[in-house]
Image (cartoon, rainbow, N blue to C red):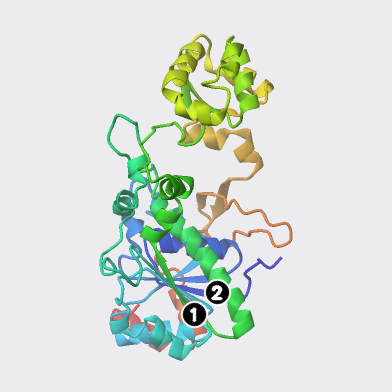
Amino acid sequence: MAGALSGIKVVDLSRVLAGPWASQLLADLGAEVIKIEKPGSGDDTRQWAPPSLPDGRAAYFLCTNRGKRSLTVDIAQPAGQEIVRKLVADADVVLENYKVGGLRKYGLDYDSLKAVNPRLVYCSITGFGQTGPYASLAGYDYIVQGMSGLMSITGPADGEPHKVGVAVSDLFTGLYAANAVQAALIARERTGAGQHIDMALFDCSLAMLANVASNWLVGHNVPPRLGNAHANIVPYQVFAASDGHFILACGNDKQFAEVCRLVGQAQWARDPRYATNPQRVAHRVQLVPLLAQAFRHHGRDYWLSALDKAGVPCGPINNVAEAFADPQAQARQMQLDMRDDAGRQVPLVGCPIKLSGTPVEYNLAPPELGEHTEQILRALGYVDSDIVALRNNGTV
């Protein structure tokens, strides 16, 4: 069955995470994705190891390059630029994450390629966007997490700011970029024209502050760092049982009354300081220690069972191995084992999108560097002697 984006051709000039995350999602949805890599070294993440597969492909590279064919091209050479232009002539999408203006000297910027293909959707991903005082700066997830305010609200209340455990600014941007590309493709159906998409890690990270950003815009109080607590809901955090930790996500007054009953303190639900969520937020300093003391009287599994039976949202804190072993993860097929063209097994995380009519298909394992170079060049009309010449001069 053809995927939802079957027939869409993507030329992917991006590297590392944000761009490849977007193009992998487009590939999962059925698009043809050709990954352009530098001869000899390829995407930086190929060397971000250990761990690696026995053949040397780094786990980091594997996580974001499923469904793509790898073409090695030196875009600094005119012959390499010509290869890219030939690919773009009938492509639908170009993804790139070079510095602002970085591809202009190669004739691979939006204006140059638009002249080749007016229907082209061209998505540029940078740290700070194509405009503004920081446009020329390189974008790094870690730095953007700090600059966007995300780190200021992450970590223990009385400790230093923390980054999130994965590169979420990159990942947010990749997801926004994939949405933007699909929106531009739909718009093209109406207008017949492509367009330039300007995506910035900084913008996306600000947008993903969600309610915390809204709290500041409305209340004008700088949001504090609350550790595992919630800015707008109490009790909604991690608590320690007698033998481990668990998450309590108590979202309304009825659920809070059930919590009070379970800990043997039903009167707390009638106390004016705690009866409603706004009052609990205002008096969290008084309430949370009382709950913390009560939860220490039994083990984690006791509380998870009791809270679940009472209809109060709660959950364990799994490590990654436990998360993948969870029956729900297995039922949802979130661990994927693919085989590459050489028959080698490649373990991957499955795509979370479940489409009933055009389901995600996994057709290509993450490629070896340049694995599809000759195949793609032949499809563009290059003959064996051309390919030999391109290899000899280092173009591919």
**Quadrant of residue 197 in the image?**
bottom left
For the image shown, how many numbered marks are present on the structure?
A: 2
- On the rendered image, what quadrant is the C terminus found in? bottom left
Label 2 CA crowd tier, 10 Å (few <14, some 14–19, many 20+): many
Determine whether, in the image, residue 192 is placed left or right of residue 291: right
Front position in the image: 45 or 278: 278
Name the residue furthest right. 357
Front position in the image: 162 or 54: 162
Tag shown at residue 170: none
In the rendered image of this protein, does residue 371 appear above or below residue 143?
below
Label 1 CA crowd tier, 10 Å (few <14, some 14–19, many 20+): many
Q: Position of residue 20 (x, y in %)?
A: 44, 62
Write the residue at 56% across / 17% down. 271
Give the residue at mark 2: 184
Give the residue at mark 1: 195
In the rendered image of this protein, does residue 267 appear above or below residue 92?
above
Write the residue at 44% across / 91% down. 115
Residue 54 in sight here: no
At mark 1, the secondary structure is strand
Write the residue at 42% across / 64% down. 19
Q: Are marks 2 and 1 in contact (CB under 8 Å)?
A: yes
- On the rendered image, what quadrant is the N terminus found in? bottom right
Q: Position of residue 270 (x, y in %)?
A: 60, 17
In the rendered image of this protein, does residue 53 appear above or below residue 365?
above
Q: Which amino acid type is shown beneath numbered disc 1?
A: Gln
**Quadrant of residue 7 in the image?**
bottom right
Q: Which amino acid type is shown beneath numbered disc 2?
A: Ala
Q: Position of residue 39 (x, y in %)?
A: 32, 71
Write the residue at 57% across / 11% down. 265
Name the residue furthest front. 272
